[in-house]
Image (cartoon, rainbow, N blue to C red):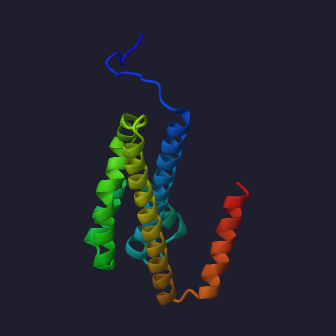
């Protein structure tokens, strides 16, 4: 039984569909990378105090990792440890993230057979991906700065980064 009889199913150009889905997936991946960076930042900078037991720290991170961008933003906004300009940049990105998550697929399908409009939607998704990646790098740099202030050496941060990257490559 067709539960969506009201939806017209026109023929879509496979190449246009592939471009749309690839760009949408890339943008979502970059937003998710940003959300992971924010969850890490919230855990390390705001929530976990020095001397916290490892199991509690891990649980804190796991809980933060499950939060949506909106919940992460609310928690970051409440802290005086988070630079206001960082919060402002995340707030500025949020409407585009929400558009992608809740309307991007529909918006893209509406223009699959309209090359000019499709190009606009693809550009919007690429812009979101670029902004999310740039913000994730900013968050990472802020996290590094915080850890160095706490006495972790640059060499140790680099070593841990390489170790994590190697684990990701082998999974």
The residue lying at 54 percent from left, 68 percent from top is 54
Quadrant in which residue 3 is drawn:
top left
Q: Quick check: 74 above or below 21?
A: below
The residue lying at 35 percent from left, 15 percent from top is 5
Query: Across the whole image, how many numbered discs are drawn on residues?
Result: 0
Instruction: Depth check: give the residue in front, 20 or 2.
Output: 20
Residue 156 visible in the current orientation: yes
Q: Looking at the figure, which quarter contains the N terminus?
A: top left
In this rendering, would 83 be left or right of 115?
A: left
Instruction: Depth check: give the residue in front, 91 or 62.
Output: 91
Residue 38 point in image, percent of width and height = 42, 66
Q: Looking at the figure, which quarter contains the C terminus?
A: bottom right
The residue lying at 47 percent from left, 25 percent from top is 11
Residue 6 point in image, percent of width and height = 31, 18
View extreme (top): residue: 1
Residue 51 point in image, percent of width and height = 48, 78
The residue lying at 28 percent from left, 63 percent from top is 74
Instruction: Depth check: give the residue in front, 143 or 97.
Output: 97
Residue 45 point in image, percent of width and height = 41, 76
Residue 39 visible in the current orientation: no
Quadrant in which residue 130 is drawn:
bottom left
Q: Quick check: 39 above or below 156?
A: above
């Amino acid at each position: 039984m067709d539960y969506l009889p009201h939806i017209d199913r026109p023929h879509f150009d496979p190449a246009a569909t592939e471009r749309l889905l690839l760009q949408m997936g890339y943008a979502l991946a970059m937003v998710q990378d940003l959300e992971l960076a924010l969850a890490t930042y919230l855990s390390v900078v705001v929530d976990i105090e020095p001397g916290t037991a490892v199991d509690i720290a891990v649980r804190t991170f796991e809980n933060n990792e499950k939060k949506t961008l909106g919940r992460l933003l609310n928690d970051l906004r409440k802290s005086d440890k988070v630079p206001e300009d960082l919060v402002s940049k995340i707030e500025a990105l949020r409407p585009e993230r929400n558009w992608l998550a809740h309307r991007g697929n529909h918006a893209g399908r509406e223009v699959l057979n309209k090359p000019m409009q499709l190009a606009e939607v693809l550009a919007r998704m690429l812009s979101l991906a670029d902004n999310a990646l740039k913000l994730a790098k900013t968050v990472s740099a802020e996290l590094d700065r915080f850890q160095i202030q706490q006495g972790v050496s640059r060499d140790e941060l680099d070593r841990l980064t390489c170790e994590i990257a190697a684990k990701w490559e082998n999974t």
